[in-house]
Image (spheres, coloured by chain):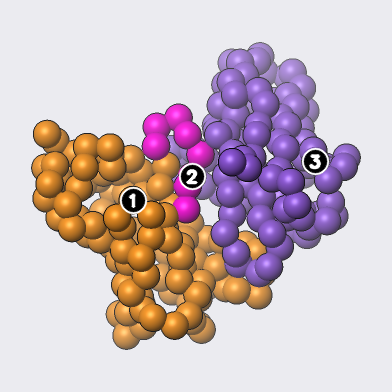
Amino acid sequence: DARVTQTPRDKVTEMGQEVTMRCQPILGHNTVFWYRQTMMQGLELLAYFRNRAPLDDSGMPKDRFSAEMPDATLATLKIQPSEPRDSAVYFCASGSGQGADTQYFGPGTRLTVL
Amino acid sequence: AQSVTQPDIHITVSEGASLELRCNYSYGATPYLFWYVQSPGQGLQLLLKYFSGDTLVQGIKGFEAEFKRSQSSFNLRKPSVHWSDAAEYFCAVGPGNTDKLIFGTGTRLQVFP
């Protein structure tokens, strides 16, 4: 049963620290999405990649957030420096890259910035 | 602008009762429509999707949804709810020519025994 995996599942850090979240998409999927979920804003798309190239990162605060795909099996989302308002659940999803096709979500990383 | 509205923030039903969760969208052309479910502490799981063809779509876990173009709606239904259906349900719309989905704010379903 192919799944998207995310690490860590939970992260507590102090304001100003760097946070790195990792995602392993489903093997063979060439599109990767990063979402942020909060009570106030709901589910927001931060960025997405196809074939490791960023297609849209307009939802991501550029000054502190960065997203990369070092290789086809790993996507990373970094926050530096982190702030309390970054506290949220961050989801990675992957898809087959065929237009608005099904996105398969990982279990999420719950980030708490103190 | 494209948007998705889920008018009901929270719905409570008794186990065995029928269920309908509402979803309205705003989009110029026929969109791709999705329903996802999120159990506590979990990611989103696809229940069903509509791209074209038969406007009544069957999904997993006994759910179905009907696309009504005239009402710009894609409501989710289940004839008999089980306690395990308690979760948050998200409707999403995708324009089809990109991968981006727009999600509604979700409806939290509570099921009483």
Residue type, label 1: Lys
> Against B112, is A57 above or below?
below
- Mark 1, mark 2: which one is toward the viewer? 1
For the residues labelled 1 and 3, say whether their Cβ atoms are less than 8 Å apart.
Answer: no
- Nearest the eye: B37 or A113: B37
Q: Residue at x 52, y 61 (%)?
A: B102
Q: What is the number of the mark on residue A53?
A: none
Residue range in magenta is B39-46
Residue indicated by mark 1: B61
Q: Residue at x 48, y 80 (%)?
A: B52
* Labels 1 and 3 positioned on one and the same chain: no
> Could you say where residue B12 lies in the image, as x and y percent from the top left?
17, 43
**Chain under disc 1:** B
C-alpha span from label 1 to label 3: 31 Å
**Chain under disc 2:** B
As drawn, is B90 to the left or to the right of A96?
left
Residue indicated by mark 3: A73
Res. A31 visible in picture:
yes
Q: Residue at x 63, y 47 (%)?
A: A93
* Labels 2 and 3 positioned on one and the same chain: no
Dot 2, crowdedness within 10 Å: few (<14), some or many (≥20)? Answer: many
- Which chain is displayed in purple in the rendered image? A
As drawn, is A8 to the left or to the right of B92?
right
Residue type, label 3: Thr
- Nearest the eye: B48 or B72: B48
As drawn, is B13 to the left or to the right of B77?
left
Residue indicated by mark 2: B44
